[in-house]
Amino acid sequence: AVDDGTADEAPTDSSAAVATNNNDGEDEGNVVLDREPGDNTGEHNYISANTCDIPSSITHPSSSSSAPFRSPSQIPLPFTATKADLDSPNFNPESHTLSHIAHSSAHTLLETNERLALDIRTLDSTMQTLVYENYSKFIDATDAIKSIGTNVTTAGESGLDRLNLGMERVAQASARSDQLLRASREAVAEKLRIQRLLTRLDALLCLPKTLRCDIAEKRHRKAVKSYKSATEILGRHSAGFESLRSIEAECGEILQELAEDLKKKLLWWGQADSGMSALTQSAVPPSSIAEIFECAGTLLMLQDTAFSPGLDRRQCQSLALSACTQFLKERLDPGRSVSLSPMNSPPNSPSRTELESTETNDQDVTNGIISELPIAFLDGLLEATTLYGVSFPVIGEDDSPSKNGSELIGSFVENNFGSFIEHVRVLLISRSESFIQPIIEESKSQEEEERKDDANFVQVSLALAHLLRSVRELASGLALPEVGMDLSIASALVDQTVELAEMLVRLRIAVKFAELRGLVLKECLTPLVREVTQTDKPDDQTEGDSRPSSSLVEMIQLSSVALSDGLQMADDLIRATLQQSQATNTAAPVDSAVVKLAVQKNARLFGIWLASTLEQLAGCEPSGNDKVLLEMEEEENNEDAKPKKKIGIAGLERDNELSGQNKDGVAVLSSLLVQLDACSDQAYSNFLLALCEMCRLAERSISTTLNQSIQSAMEEDARVAESANTLFGGTINPHRKGKDGLDVEHILSKRFQLASSRALSMYILDRGTHAASHLCTGMLQFADARDPYAIPTRPREDVLKLFDIIRASCEDAISIMGGDLFASAVPSFPDEIDYANAFGERLSGGSVGGTTSGLKMDVERMFIENIQVYPHAFDELEFTRNSVISGILRVALSGLVECVRSSVFSSLGLRQMKVDAVLLRYLLPHYVKDVYGTPDANAFTSVCNAIDNVMLNAEQRCVDPEVIGDDEYYDSEKDEIVTPFLVVQQFLFSNDGDESVMERISFS
């Protein structure tokens, strides 16, 4: 029965599964039909029934009056039958059988029937065998019980009677023997008692000599124990015997002298804060740590006697640990490292055994770093901790830690191990300096450098493994109940050692990637810069020293090859580092996951460095420096333009592990920048665009390439782990699980996006600066006022050179960005009535001059000065031809404005400026257009405003105010009136003009 009473709407999905709700029996009888995990619907259909016996109602359709009989394929089933259902505790045979009938073919049913019959026969045979075995055991047990009763009965009562009689005879004989030997035994016991008394008396008479012998052999505690054991007898009998009284006095003097001497020694040895080492004073230094605690323990034993040294338990503990600290510091002394090396340890010590095994395997390594490790320091630390627990046992469980001194021994272990690990850190880093030597020493061959580096890495790895084993032994000893050290302190020692090992591995990897940076500079970027500088020399070079400049396409190919070579070097280094780590994994105490993380971090830093280096080659300041820049946000006044995007890169990692080791790289980079300053303008502009395209290619590929190198290097170990975990290899590769660990936040792609944008901005500035230099040429001639009626005859040649730069920039832009070569075709020259639409109000209208003209200029300036000429360092530039050409024109006109502001114009100069402006405004739609709804919405308008700003500043600096706004010039030679529009039109379209001028300044 279905929830709404209509069985026809019940789900017929054969992949449904039964799940009953048993929450405290509240929903008993409700059956949940849930789909298999492979079902994408994820829906749950609920079927309610009076009982859970659904197959009963299904197999008897007549019992349900509301649902007619249907074929098995139409019957809603709670689950699909599987072989695992037979072992389920909730197995329902009717549902299982019905499911097979409804969803299995005849062949499958026959196979299932045959398999079940075979299983039944097998189970019957097994059960029969078990029954026979149990029955046989039961029969054997019954026979055994019967045999026990028979044997007991057979023995009879006669045997027991004989046994009882024998035991009584033995007891009588033993009683007679005791009676006869009692007197002899008592005599022997008396003689033994007299012997013990004589022995004690002899020891009492020899007590002073015994005390002196024990003190001479530095068995102070034994001497004190001997005196304490004799104190009771001496105190009780010394009054009646002169000899005992003299013995008591002599022993007292010996112990008093002993107490003073031990106190003086311990105070001398424990002066850690006196500013002078205790071992350099007049006192004899301790020969061992055991002597220190022998001294402290003896003073503690004398504390409750008449010879008390005046030191309480806390002072004895503190002085003993301070003396041990001074003693252990001597084991870190480089001058004594050989005498206190593990080779001078006891013959059966673990450090001696390990070192001898290492010596057998590799004599060179033994003579290297391992022999310099002060492992004897760890042995001394463990010895001091153990003797501390023996000399100062815990008073009671309820006493505070400060009373028992547990915080003192904990601080002692932590401080001394910190000194040890710092000493080892300095030692290993100093021995690892050969990692850095290949960066500095260029005279050696690369193979020799790599061979030496690998040998040093093996030595350092073996030394770290030996160190970690020794520290683990120390931690295990400290964690013993006899020592009583806190487990957290013992585990912290191992953690510090592992951290040291990981630090050295990270340092090695960082140095390797620092080498990679130098190789990329020398092998990839230096040939690229050399190609730029040698293909086209400046004009002052002779023709024999120059060769044709490489085209932009060739330059882009060279930059792509340089990037590919650099990434290949990075791939080789990553593979070599990870594979070497896996090969030495048995010796190195660092997990491969730590090496992988270090490689990922340094690969990320390498990508960031490469982006910064390309920016510097383009002429930018590195964006990752620590300088604080004042950032002014620009207000967007045009609603049609989208706000400019900023490339924000948060959380850039710093390369702090090799600070100060990149001097050679900086020198090489500075040399490349000097070479670029000497190349030609065209070659440098091509180089800038090639760098831009190189950064865009790296933005798309560097993260993926580096990550694939790491993953492929780790793939072999991951495959082994997969095959070990599962028979079918269905587990997830741990190195491929989750997100990309190299660049999860896409920092590399953003960094190269920023680098490409900055390189493009440098190209715009370079081309715009050259165009501005042409526009500003001959500006002093505009101040010539000798002929006030002179009129211009054509635009300046320097303006035409501007269009040469614009044409070349259009061709360069579409080579890497694609798109149209120009914005629109050159329009026909407008009629006079259309001047305002074509050239704007300022060029076509003008003003009547005078004061009103000046006021109008001030008002117009308010609307045309808000032009962003130079892009911000973090602006995301549009990679379109329209954006690039608009930027070049804005930079060029901005330079022209600054030149105009420092010049004075005659009437001829102002008229010439207007002719040039008309030519610019006429050809501007051919190169630039406004693309509404994009950041290029003001590309055309901003350039027009820049032209108007040029004319506004020129009119303000004109010495003849009457010509301002006067666009009609009288040509006395031709006896006609000409305008700047007519001059431009005649220059471009007259028959006697230069026919190639339009081909020069436009594409149509």
Image (cartoon, helix red, strand yellow):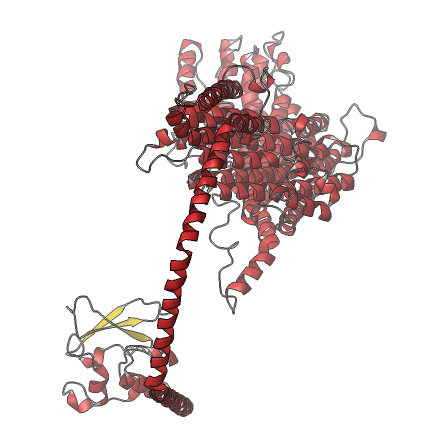
User: Can residue 931 be seen from the camera position used here?
Assistant: no
Residue 336 on image: x %, y %: 66, 28
User: Can residue 737 be seen from the camera position used here?
Assistant: yes
The total of numbered circles placed on residues is: 0
Q: Nearer the viewer, residue 868 or 460?
A: 460
Tell me if residue 280 comes above or below residue 149 in the rendering: above
Q: Nearer the viewer, residue 708 or 844?
A: 708
Q: Quadrant of residue 919?
A: top right
The quadrant of the image that shows the C terminus is top right
Residue 839 on image: x %, y %: 49, 28
Q: Quadrant of residue 116?
A: bottom left
Tell me if residue 367 comes above or below residue 186 in the rendering: above
Q: Nearer the viewer, residue 8 or 545?
A: 8
Q: In this image, 499 relative to 568: left or right? A: left
The quadrant of the image that shows the N terminus is bottom left
Residue 408 on image: x %, y %: 43, 29
